[in-house]
Image (spheres, rainbow, N blue to C red):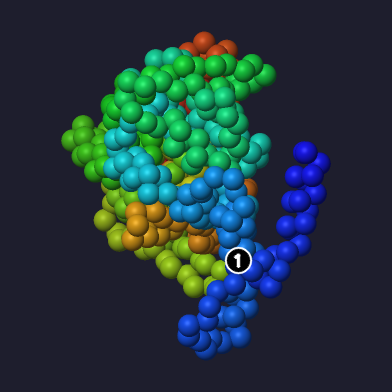
């Protein structure tokens, strides 16, 4: 019986033309004249339409046509082969907007799609979040969510599963080095703090920018106001594990700390270039920027501009190397498209995509300290990169 069914299937598959499947014949009620270019384009999608008709006709139960079309849209964009481009369902767009605004229900970690190993990588665990409570760490690689495997290309789908109703649990499996660890995490509402600042011993201002989202520009402005009021001797901007965010936010922050000129230029495949300029009013203080392998995108725009202007010293390890920007397009039904639309260039004209930015001073973190405390909770005295920044500022070796 099984063999007969398979053979029957083989008989159906060549019969993709309407002439051999009468049920697909449609009465022509009116004709429309279109160009050859339009006709050829429509012909490209004939196979999808035939597949839809075949499933509707032969699948043994009724099917949800809208759900099939949504899945086709997801697959269409995934076919680009770009980890940064995705089709968002209505629910995905709602979740995306929630995170951009700074509050959502989930487990509380920041992720990046790492093209080097095709794995979803945690770049930050939010303070007080469910992820922190169970012991998840920066650098963990998420491989399974509720026992389903997700690659970097499917990060948005994995995020969609990890979010949900507060009080309900989700199982997340990570790789930490060669070890595989399962976490059962109870979701709750997560409030994201995008910027934190304090004044360190020696009257040095220290500001951490976790993301270029939400109220990050306002938070950075408040940090600078506090530093001005204290008349700090220098400033440390911590961009480690900052996966990026909004390009405009990085430009506005650069405007606060850099002299007049170009911060970044963005160029699409047609050659159209948009240049982002800033004015000559800025906070001028000796500056060190901390970066690492998870400093990406908007983080690299800001750190690249600081490097090219010669207005600060970069300390840490080479940055991630995401030199492309995405645009988000909203559809009337609430769904959307995030698609890579251009490359960006630092003020010197460099595109750092898949290259990254080398710091002026390379400093690795102590592995034993990271193992003991986790990168999110390193005490200042155990943070070799932060200590190097303090040393440079104290010695007056930074412009």
Figure quadrant of residue 177? top right
379 vs 366, left or right, is left
Q: Is residue 205 visible?
A: no
Residue located at (26% from left, 56% from top): 281
Q: Position of residue 179 (x, y in %)?
A: 64, 16
Location of residue 112 in the rendering, given as x and y in whole percent from the top left corner: 51, 38
Q: Nearer the viewer, residue 14 or 264?
A: 14
Q: Which residue is mark 1?
A: 23
Q: Quadrant of the C terminus?
A: top left
Above or below — where is 198 with respect to 293?
A: above
Q: Nearer the viewer, residue 96 or 91?
A: 91
Residue 179 in view (yes/no): yes
The residue lying furthest to the left in this view is: 229
Q: Is residue 165 above or below residue 327?
A: above
Mark 1, secondary structure of its residue: helix
Q: Quadrant of the N terminus?
A: top right
Which one is in front, 55 or 138?
Answer: 55
């Amino acid at each position: 019986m099984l063999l007969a069914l398979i053979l029957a299937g083989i008989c159906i598959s060549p019969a993709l033309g309407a002439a051999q499947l009468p049920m697909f014949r449609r009465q022509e009620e009116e004709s429309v004249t279109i160009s050859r270019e339009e006709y050829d384009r429509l012909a490209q999608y004939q196979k999808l339409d035939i597949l839809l008709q075949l499933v509707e006709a032969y699948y043994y139960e009724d099917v949800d046509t809208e759900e099939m079309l949504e899945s086709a849209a997801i697959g269409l964009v995934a076919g680009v082969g770009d980890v940064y481009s995705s089709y968002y369902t209505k629910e995905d767009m709602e979740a995306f907007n929630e995170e951009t605004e700074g509050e959502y229900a989930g487990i509380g970690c920041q992720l990046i799609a790492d093209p080097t190993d095709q794995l979803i990588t945690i770049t930050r665990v939010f303070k007080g979040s469910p992820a922190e409570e169970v012991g998840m760490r920066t650098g963990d690689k998420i491989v399974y969510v509720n026992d389903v495997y997700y690659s970097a290309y499917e990060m948005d789908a994995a995020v969609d599963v990890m979010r949900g109703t507060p009080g309900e649990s989700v199982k997340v499996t990570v790789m930490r080095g060669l070890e595989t660890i399962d976490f059962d995490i109870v979701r709750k509402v997560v409030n994201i703090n995008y910027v934190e600042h304090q004044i360190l011993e020696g009257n040095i201002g220290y500001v951490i920018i976790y993301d270029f989202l939400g109220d990050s520009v306002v938070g950075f402005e408040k940090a600078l106001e506090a530093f001005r009021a204290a008349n700090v001797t220098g400033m440390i901007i911590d961009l480690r594990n900052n996966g990026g965010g909004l390009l405009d936010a990085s430009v506005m922050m650069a405007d606060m700390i850099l002299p007049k000129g170009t911060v970044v230029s963005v160029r699409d495949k047609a050659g159209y270039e948009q240049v982002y300029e800033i004015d000559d009013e800025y906070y001028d203080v000796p500056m060190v920027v901390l970066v690492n392998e998870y400093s990406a995108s908007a983080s690299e725009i800001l750190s690249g501009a600081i490097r090219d202007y010669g207005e600060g010293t970069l300390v840490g390890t080479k940055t991630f190397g995401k030199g492309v920007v995405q645009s988000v397009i909203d559809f009337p039904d609430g769904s959307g498209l995030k698609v890579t639309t251009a490359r960006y260039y630092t003020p010197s004209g460099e595109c750092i995509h898949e290259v990254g930015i080398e710091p002026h001073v390379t400093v690795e973190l102590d592995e034993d300290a990271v193992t003991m405390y986790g990168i999110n909770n390193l005490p200042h005295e155990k943070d070799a990169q932060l200590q190097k920044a303090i040393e440079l500022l104290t010695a007056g070796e930074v412009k």
